[in-house]
Image (cartoon, helix red, strand yellow):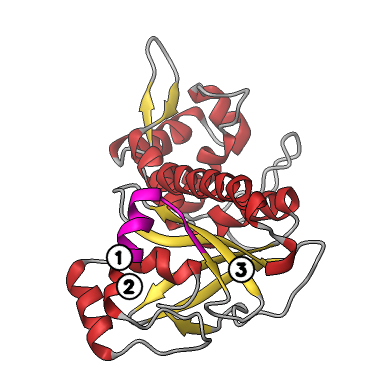
Amino acid sequence: MPGQRVTGASGYRERNSTADRALDILALFDDRRLVLGGQEVADALGVARSTAYRYLQSLVSSGFVEEQQPAGYRLGPRVFELARLARKGVGLSEAARPVMRDLADAVGEAVLLTRRTGTSVVCLEREEAAHPIRLSYERGHVVPVNAGSAGLVLLAWAPGKEVDRIVEAGLPRLTGATLTDVTTLRARLAAIREEGVAVSRGELDPDVMGVAAPIRDGGGNVVAAVSIAALSHRVPDSRVPGIARAVVSAAGEITSRLTLMTS
């Protein structure tokens, strides 16, 4: 094609676009080549050294590479800024799924990832375990925020005005155990904040118990909850403290991943 050639020794396919050449230069960096010389770039691109130098200077002026003394070029600050933004763009689900899988394997129960949306809680992800169960929480399903451990955790760290608004809108009852009394609910939320974990039995689904802990972003704000859901008869009270520790640990791990991705 016009404007393209193949250099026999390198197999490099030359393109006209300066942007293409810049990307090709950036792609030359790897774990074994943290610093590149001008001649090394020229050889890889199949161009004259003066041409390679011109491309390199363009990258230097834009901050994508910087000169390394006494000779050579290394990646510049603009690349690291883009890497930071790329990590920040990774979603909550991507950060949580590996941890959720490990938690499901460790406790042998289903694991949920949820977020609050106004007066409701939406299930973002669900990891099954050896004992699949039917739940109101399926991926994409929305349930009232006052029912179940995940919702209560998210409500416990919601801003005070948000809690007031939710309470004033009315607290729907899903089962006989669902919290609908305002005074009792507020006391429960205070206890959850103090303990750092919520445990519920039959408040969302009659025969299901849950244990949930908050997930925070890099600023310390609660942005989601991770929880386990199991048939109540499989989780006697004696087993709850161990599961609670595992859930809190998983929430901490997801928080750490989010903080790293957005730092």
Q: Nearer the viewer, residue 40 or 117?
A: 117
Disc 2 crowd, CA 10 A, few/some/many (<14, 14-19, 20+): few
The span shown in magenta is 188-199
Judge left or right: residue 52 versus residue 102.
left
- Residue on which disc 3 sits: 209
Say which mark, if any, is on residue 187.
1
The verdict on residue 196 being magenta is yes
* Residue 10 in sight in this render: yes
At x 75% / y 51%, what residue is drawn? 105
At x 61% / y 52%, what residue is drawn? 240
Asked which quadrant contains residue 197, the reply is bottom left
Amino acid carrying mark 2 in the image: Thr
The verdict on residue 13 being magenta is no
- Residue on which disc 2 sits: 184
Asked which quadrant contains residue 78, the reply is top left
Q: Nearer the viewer, residue 57 or 67?
A: 67
